[in-house]
């Protein structure tokens, strides 16, 4: 687990502010890197030891970096399928304390931002 992200859910007592983040686009920046994601605030199972708690997750579906391919309307061979990948990381309390509402320099559709300190720590998963 890093200071800002974890691979497994971290459980928090929900607040109205936290709940308001669910489904919102977020712009994450760390140093010269920046990328969009979506925030998901999810409830623990009501029968679990974490009942009445929530997790906060940032996720995105990376788009493959490959050349455009022409599409046939009636292909004669089976389609080539790729594994769809999903980047997701659970936010820690340190990360959640850095979430801010929209700034003017962010893309228009982005409602939240997370500016992480430019540290050598990486979260690539």
Image (cartoon, grey):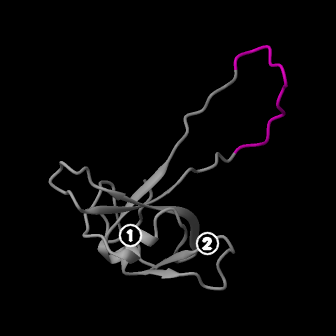
Based on the picture, tell me whether residue 76 belongs to the magenta stretch.
Answer: yes
The residue that appears at 55% across and 34% down in the rendered structure is 83
The residue that appears at 58% across and 65% down in the rendered structure is 36
Gap in Å between the C-alphas at discs 2 and 1?
25 Å
Quadrant of the image for the N terminus? bottom left
The magenta region covers 66-78
The residue that appears at 41% across and 81% down in the rendered structure is 98
Give residue 12's position: percent from left, percent from top.
26, 68
Q: In this rendering, is residue 125 above or below 101?
A: above
The residue that appears at 71% across and 43% down in the rendered structure is 66
In which image quadrant can residue 35 be found? bottom right
Say what secondary structure mark 1 lies in: loop
Say what secondary structure mark 2 lies in: loop
Which numbered dot is residue 121? Answer: 1
46 lies left or right of 23: left
In which image quadrant can residue 89 be found? bottom left
Q: Residue furthest top?
A: 76
Q: In this rendering, is residue 62 above or below 58?
A: above
101 lies left or right of 66: left
From the viewer's side, name the closer residue of 1 and 56: 56
The residue wearing badge 2 is 110
Q: In this rendering, is residue 6 above or below 76?
A: below
Q: Residue furthest bottom?
A: 104
From the viewer's side, name the closer residue of 33 and 115: 115
Main SS type for the magenta part? loop
Give residue 79's position: percent from left, percent from top.
70, 23
In which image quadrant can residue 4 be found? bottom left
Based on the picture, tell me whether residue 6 belongs to the magenta stretch.
Answer: no
């Amino acid at each position: 687990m890093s200071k800002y992200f974890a691979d497994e859910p971290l459980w928090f007592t929900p607040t109205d502010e936290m709940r308001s983040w669910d489904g919102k686009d977020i712009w994450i920046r760390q140093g010269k890197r920046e990328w969009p994601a979506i925030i998901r605030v999810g409830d623990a199972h009501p029968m679990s030891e974490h009942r009445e708690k929530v997790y906060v997750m940032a996720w995105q579906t990376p788009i493959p970096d490959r050349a455009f391919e022409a599409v046939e309307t009636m292909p004669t061979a089976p389609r080539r399928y790729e594994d769809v990948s999903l980047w997701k990381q659970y936010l820690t309390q340190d990360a959640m304390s850095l979430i801010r509402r929209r700034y003017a320099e962010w893309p228009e559709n982005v409602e939240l931002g997370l500016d992480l300190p430019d540290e050598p720590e990486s979260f690539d998963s």
